[in-house]
Amino acid sequence: MTHTIRKATADDAGPLAALAAVTFPLACPPSSSPEDIAAHVANTLSERHFREYLADPYVSILVIDADGALRGYSLLVNRPAGDPDVASALKVLPSMELSKCYVHPEHHGLGAAGELMRASLQAAAEAGAAGVWLGVNSQNARAIRFYEKSGFRKVGSKSFRLGTTVEHDFVLERAV
C-alpha cells in the first residue's frame, strides 16, 4: 500500500465522514444497537461535524491518504479535559486528547495504525503537549492491546453515552 500521512483539509470532510461511518462501529461493544451507533455517527461524525472540527483551531486531524482514498484518521484535541473523572486521572500535563484514531479494516495488520499513532504523538509534541490521553471502550480488547503496545497505560475510567446506553471507557495516558 502506498500512502502518506498528512494534515486533513476542508476537502476531506466528506471522505472523513464516510470513513468514520465504516470505522466507528468497529470500536463499539457487540451489545451496541445499530440505532445507537447510527445516531452517534449522525450526531458527531457527519460531514458537517468534520467541517466544524477542521475549522476549530484546537483540533488537528491527520489522515492516511492511500492513493487518493482516506484509509485512516486521528483527531487530536488541544484543550484541557472537560470531564472531571478524566482531569483528575491525568498525570502528564499539559495533555492533549487523542479523540479518534481509526484505520479502515482493509488496512488492519499492515502497520498503518502504528504509523498514524506515531504521527499523532509527534503532532501532539510539536503542539506543546507533554502527554496524550484517550478513552477506549473497556470491552475493546483489540484497541486496548494496540494502545498499550503504543505506550499508553490505564490511569482511570469515564462514562461515554452511545445513544440510549452508557458505555464505560478506560482512560489511557502516555508521555510524548
Image (tube, rainbow, N blue to C red):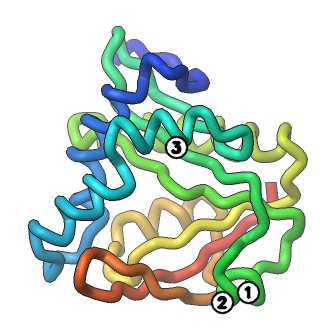
Other residues around mark 1 within 10 Å, as few (<14) / some (14–19) / many (≥20)? some
As measured in the structure, the alpha-carbon distance from the residue carrying label 3 to the one carrying label 2 is: 23 Å
The residue at the point 66 percent across, 53 percent down is 77
Image coords of residue 9 (percent x, y): 54, 21
Quarter-of-image position of residue 47? top left
Give the position of the N terminus as an image quadrant: top left
Name the residue type under label 1. Ala
Other residues around mark 3 within 10 Å, as few (<14) / some (14–19) / many (≥20)? many
The kind of secondary structure element at disc 2 is helix
- Return the residue found at the far top: 67
Work out whether 117 lies above or below 139: above
- In the picture of the structure, the residue carrying the numbered disc 3 is 74
Name the residue type under label 2. Asp
The residue at the point 30 percent across, 75 percent down is 162
The residue at the point 83 percent across, 45 percent down is 125
As measured in the structure, the alpha-carbon distance from the residue carrying label 1 to the one carrying label 2 is: 6 Å
Q: Earlier in the sequence, mark 3 or mark 2?
A: 3
Other residues around mark 2 within 10 Å, as few (<14) / some (14–19) / many (≥20)? some
Q: Which mark is residue 85?
A: 2
Image coords of residue 97 (percent x, y): 66, 60
Disc nearest the viewer among 1 and 2: 2
Image coords of residue 93 (percent x, y): 88, 68
Image-based side of 86 in relation to 105, left or right: right
The kind of secondary structure element at disc 3 is strand
Check if mark 1's residue and mark 2's residue have beta carbons within 8 Å: yes
Image-based side of 10 in relation to 33, left or right: right
Check if mark 3's residue and mark 2's residue have beta carbons within 8 Å: no
Work out whether 102 lies above or below 61: below
- In the picture of the structure, the residue carrying the numbered disc 1 is 89
The kind of secondary structure element at disc 1 is helix
**Is residue 5 visible to us here?**
no
